Image (cartoon, rainbow, N blue to C red):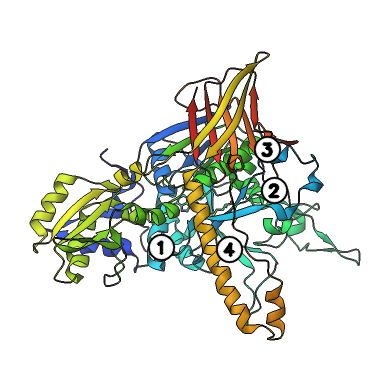
Amino acid sequence: MPIKYVPYYPETIEGQAILNNVTRTQRVLRYRDNNKVHDHIRRGMPYYELEKIERVGNNSENMLIRGECISACAYLKDKGIKVDLVYIDPPFASGADYAKKIYLRRNPKLAEKIAKTEEELDIEEFRIFEEKMYGDIWNKEDYLNWMYENLMAIKSVMSEIGSIYVHLDWHIGHYVKVLMDEVFGEDNFRNEIVWCYTGPSRQTNDFPDKHDVIYRYSRSESYIFNFEKIKIPYVKLNTGKTRGIFKGEATLSEEGKIPEDWWSDITPVARLHATELLNYQTQKPEALLERIIKASSNESMIVADFFGGSGVTAKVANDLNRKFIHVDVGINSIQTTRDRLIAAGAEFDIYDIKDGVSLFRNPIQTMDKLKSLIKGLNAEPTLDSFWIGAINDSKIGLVPVYVPNLLDNGTKVLDIPMINSIINGAIPDLPDSVKKVIIYYVDIENEKDLNKFINDYNKTDMQIELRDLKEILDEAVINDEVDYELKKINNRFEIEFKSFISDRLIQNIDAYNQKKLLNSSISNLFNESIEGDGENGDVTKNKKPFKPIEISESGLELIELISLDCSNFSGVWKSDIELKIDKNGFIILNGKKTKELWNGKIISDKKPLRMKVRNIAGDESIIIF
Ligand SMILES: C[S@@+](CC[C@H](N)C(=O)[O-])C[C@H]1O[C@@H](n2cnc3c(N)ncnc32)[C@H](O)[C@@H]1O
């Protein structure tokens, strides 16, 4: 499909200081031909096809969108949808990879044998492994370029009375503040909120980092600020006096005051030990969003989070009778939020943006996987990091391979500026012996123009082969295998699960076991050498040896959710009955927690037409009856 670009507001505000060392400008400057400048930023947001995949209830104004922030904004802009409040908590450029703990469930065959009390579920029995969710390792320049595009995209879909809150920390916050001044205008800066918290910290020679920053900007001078709705109580002192009432402030209300721009009264989720805690790293507390949403929106307005994670914004917006739009690039986020919202009784539609990166749950896992999907590809340390590796061709020797970085929207489309930088930047640095390179792309702007450009400007006799990355991704999907029996008993339909085989999970669990075993044998070696070495020796002796995770023959412990659609054979999914198995093996039926352990069955009054089975890592398989 040819790519359509939806423009956003192109101009920076006159007189505004800008961060000048960001790739956005360099990239444009690299290609000037006959006074023609190819301006990447001005072209706008890539618009991809969007598929509605599920309907929950009847409120189509509430949306969950799997895809990148920038592509979701292109869709909203194209449809003329404006949002009134944006909260984003994007990756912080923290230098970390975020992982999700994956819990193997209780096998129902074994669960039958144990008593149905929570106490008997020994926490030690949990079998857990980890999978990567998203990466947050950036160089500053790439990050800021990416963030600039996201902010421009978001601004283009904000209503005139809209506000935006951008949640960051010391890693990159101050640079993003400068970008926000540029994009939204310094005059529209409203607050730098400091969210302070306490918690364990590593002992260092520095003050522990215990605050995040949240930049608040408005779209224009008229914006919503409901100070009456967010007042907090004054603190009564032992002396009987009330602390915090100063002249002027007291006139607002005797009952309470507007919180200052530093918030120390909101506890991070990890320390709440609350029912709120989901298995989603970086999850923010509902109380934080409650304050923001109450302050800067009114009932029925649209609240959007373009880096939605565990769905905190959507959940609180729904609780407060606002409409919500939740966007996230990871399938785990969409599933976690979907289940969270169903439990909260929300109604919404789920969409998938067809941007070609969803195969392995999220871009980071897809990137990891890609290396093994390109036949003959090997790491090639003699090449610089632009190339993912090289294929050794028996006739022409080393063929360097370039693959776009799926974590960086800017590299996914192969266009003239990109091919130009490959011809004039990357290729001249290759050894003379190289005769051919392979360039993969997710989307290509115009193949004919690109080939003409290559012919006109490639002054070497190097062959440049262009390949579509989606083709190798498409070939690599191996669905999970579900073996079941469907019976009609007393006018009800019963599906009994016999076995479940997931190649994707088996491979990931094997890789995890091997990594852990290797680590534990290395640490065993280390322990031996320091045995009797005072305190260290004592500590390490207590460590339990790693027990590899095994999967039973039936594999039913790999199932997380079963949903039956009794309304349609195809098209948008409608879950008429669904059963989720929590990490203790208890059933959550249609979003409601129960104390029942899963018995390996699902029963429906209506005739099921198709069934969706989600495995514990989030892959979904659909069976049509
Ligand atoms: C810090 S987390 C958000 C956590 C969230 N506030 C919560 O309370 O659960 C950042 C999220 O951004 C998502 N993400 C990363 N890059 C993205 C992009 N380009 N577009 C949309 N989402 C993205 C990640 O998958 C991750 O879920």
In space, the residues marked 3 and 2 are separated at their CA atoms by 30 Å
- Residue 565 appears at what percent x and percent y? 55, 24
Q: Which residue is mark 2?
A: 276
- Which mark sits nearer the N-terminus, 1 or 2? 1
Q: Which residue is mark 1?
A: 144
- Residue 519 appears at what percent x and percent y? 55, 69
- Which mark sits nearer the N-terminus, 2 or 4? 4
Residue toward you, 418 or 378: 378
Element type at marker 4? strand
* Mark in the foreground, 2 or 4: 2
The amino acid pointed to by label 1 is: Leu
Q: Residues within 10 Å of mark 2 (few under 14, many from 20)?
A: some
* Mark in the foreground, 3 or 2: 3
Element type at marker 3? helix
Element type at marker 2? loop
Element type at marker 1? helix
Instruction: Relative to 420, say whether 526 is above or below.
Output: below
Q: Residues within 10 Å of mark 4 (few under 14, many from 20)?
A: many
Mark 4, ligand 1, within 8 Å: the answer is no
In space, the residues marked 1 and 4 are separated at their CA atoms by 17 Å
